[in-house]
Image (spheres, rainbow, N blue to C red):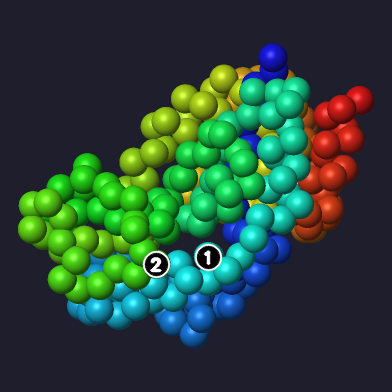
Amino acid sequence: MKRIVVLTGAGVSAESGIATFRDAGGLWEGYDVMEVATPQAWEKDPALVLKFYNMRRKDALKAKPNAAHKTLVQLEQSFDVKIITQNVDNLHERAGSHFVLHLHGELFKSRSTKNPNLVYEMQSAELNLGDHCELNSQLRPHIVWFGEEVPEMINAVEIVQKADILIIIGTSMVVYPAAGLINYIRPKTPIYVIDPGNPEMDTDQVTFINKKATEGSKDLLKLLST
């Protein structure tokens, strides 16, 4: 069975109604990203950061998987599919995808501020000051903030290196280190890019599908079925 690796970004979640800060000039629901998504922001005002992610979590709960999410699940009938996503929502999982690696963390998990290896599934949509881990330290969102390392990159590289087909959906591939993953594919590996624009890529093995994620994924399914 051929191995498909899919890199997904905000463009996939956007069609489910989840806002992206890049489309709003660096703002999420009116919040400057530097005020709510950096280690410095956490040190300055943890209550604001928690409030912001509580809002994002509630928005994500209202959203539903779209056709792009569901198409990737369909691909599992014929391929070994592994998804590497920059999104922190759980829409891929809710659609039914079996393997999803979250590069930038997960909205519905929290982790200890004392030991980053202590990660917990959230039991409610809210995380507040005074919510502690087993070490009695404050819990924070399990999110990779701007300026922090991306610990899952090592695993992501290993997955991309084994791909027989690479699919890129809803990401312009300009944010590093995620954008660098394309450099780890094996020579002559077919690449399919679903994007309404034309992301610049220094390779001649790319097939562009210039549509949004929901429409382009349907075209992709037809291409891979022939």
Q: Position of residue 68 (x, y in %)?
A: 73, 49
Mark 1 element type: helix
Q: Given the current orientation, which residue lies at the most extreme bottom position? A: 30
Q: Which residue is pictured at 39% across the width and 67% down the height?
A: 125
Mark 2 element type: loop
Q: Quadrant of the C terminus?
A: top right
| Disc 1 target residue | 61
Residue 47 seen from this side: yes
Q: Given the current orientation, which residue lies at the most extreme front position? A: 123
Distance, label 1 to label 2, CA atoms, is 8 Å
Q: Please tell me how crowded label 2 is: few (under 14), some (14-19), or many (20+) other residues with Cα within 10 Å.
A: some
Residue type (three-letter) at the residue carrying disc 1: Leu
Residue type (three-letter) at the residue carrying disc 2: Ala
User: In the image shown, does 56 or 120 lie closer to the viewer?
Assistant: 120
Q: Position of residue 27 (x, y in %)?
A: 50, 78
Residue 199 seen from this side: no
Sequence order check, earlier mark of 1 and 2:
1
| Disc 2 target residue | 125
